[in-house]
Amino acid sequence: MDDLISAIATAVGAGGIAVVRMSGRDALSVAKKMFSRKGDFEPNRMYAGEIDAGSFRDFGMCVYFRAPRSFTGEDVVEFHCHGGTEIARGILRRTLALGARLAERGEFTKRAYLNGKLSLSAAEGVGEMIAASSEAQVRAGYLLYNEKLTRLGTQLQNKLKHCLAEVDADLDYPEEDLNASSRKEIVGVLSDAEAELAALLSQYAAGRKIKAGVSVALVGNPNAGKSSLFNALLGYDRAIVSDVAGTTRDVVEGTLEIGGVNFRLTDTAGLRESADAVEREGVRRAREAIKGADVIVWLKEDGDSPVFPEGIPVITVGAKSDLSRRGDCDVVLSSHTGEGLDALRQLLYEKGFGRENDGAFLLSERHYRAAQAALDAVRAARNAAEEGLPPELYAEDIRRAWETLGTLSGETASEAIVTEIFDKFCVGK
């Protein structure tokens, strides 16, 4: 898979520069036909000169990365030309005319994976960074790209491999009575692996919030100040604010970034009984938003005691502090003066997201399913070992856990999984 591929590696459109990338056999020979440099190309050095696109020329830069010390592990050449649409397209057409073929989606990164330059989860980290809509997603994607998840999976696989070695010894040398002496060690190793996998799975909730954002429902009675708070948090007027109770009759959404994490705010209709059919529908939608929220901001008023779903953190807010002040709330604020808004943002981060760390996040459903399947297999093996069952009965569970963990790095991933992952990439990456 080292035939020459080429693609535009930057977004198409107006801009300062564009990059056309080639990877594979003959990348350097094509570059020499298109670039004005006289003499040899030193690897990892940028040269300035004319790029010959056939029907026109552009003044730009050319850099050559020699295999295997390149992103893909193959010979790679990049042309850095002026931005826009037609210049990059013209240079791309010229590379195709000289023998390259158009790269498929994600093919550069796929070649890096196939050539052992990065693991499958690291490649997914590249995709996460490209698709990021928040700084937190960039950071989490970089941890994936930096092989955090792969290293953890490999460490767990090594522990399971040790267990399998102990089991094989029991089966190969039954006369040595190794079963009794090694069973306790196997149970201990499996227990450790089980705890590590459980801790990893606990990161999925945070990973989901990093990708999708933290869902926040602003709730309270009609005219409690929800829309004013909604606008104050966003920093602009998104919801209609009126002294007339019941103005908000549908959910209104907006996005706020706190600490690099996106928080999806939902301004809901006031919770009350109403004869108005439209307002009743608004209240129904408000209750649905409450059920699906990661955190609830309740604008508390006297005599107000709604019942919220169990397990969802609730921040009680005493609003309109410029008019009146109450002390039975988590935070007292004024949407008009801005008092207390920073304290509310901090509480939203703590209760809605928690604490970001530098460990491995499970950002995709694929990672979650693999970790859960590995945990189930490890748990089954540990239970069988503790019950004193024959080693051959739980060896298969250990092998299943080992193979499942290998799908994280790509060591045991099927071709279908690999294809599905790289089909999500853009052309040129």
Image (cartoon, grey):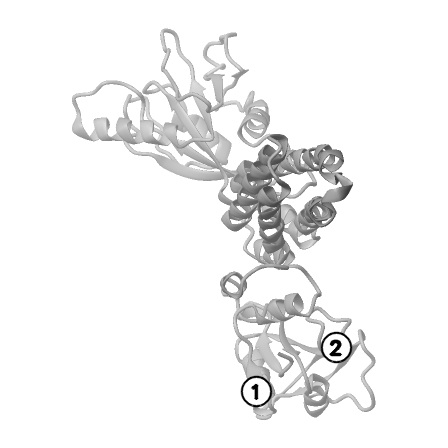
Query: In percent of the image, x 39 and y 23: which residue is there?
Result: 219
| Nearer to us: label 1 or label 2 | 1
User: Foreground: 146 or 325?
Assistant: 146
- Above or below 205: residue 8: below
Q: Is residue 177 left or right of residue 55?
A: right
Instruction: Using the numbered discs, state the Cα–Cα distance from disc 1 to disc 2 in whole angstroms.
Output: 18 Å
Residue 203 seen in this snapshot: no
| Residue 336 picture location, percent across and down | 48, 23
Q: Quadrant of residue 178?
A: top right
| Residue 236 picture location, percent across and down | 46, 37
Query: In percent of the image, x 65 and y 65: which residue is there?
Result: 113
| Residue 374 picture location, percent across and down | 57, 44
- Above or below 420: residue 389: above
Which image quarter holds the N terminus? bottom right
Q: Secondary structure at mark 1?
A: helix
Can you name the residue that lies furthest to the front here? 175
The answer to the question of whether label 1 and label 2 lie on touching residues, with beta carbons closer than 8 A, is: no
- Callout 1 amino acid: Leu
The circle drawn on residue 63 is 2
Total numbered badges shown on the rendered structure: 2
- Pointer 2: residues within 10 angstroms few (<14), some, or many (20+)? many
- Pointer 1: residues within 10 angstroms few (<14), some, or many (20+)? some
| Residue 104 picture location, percent across and down | 53, 74
Q: Secondary structure at mark 2?
A: strand
- Above or below 26: residue 213: above
User: Foreground: 390 or 314?
Assistant: 390
Residue 71 seen in this snapshot: yes
- Callout 2 amino acid: Val
- Above or below 390: residue 74: below
User: Foreground: 365 or 82?
Assistant: 365
- Of the numbered discs 1 and 2, the one sitting upstream in the chain is 2
The circle drawn on residue 96 is 1
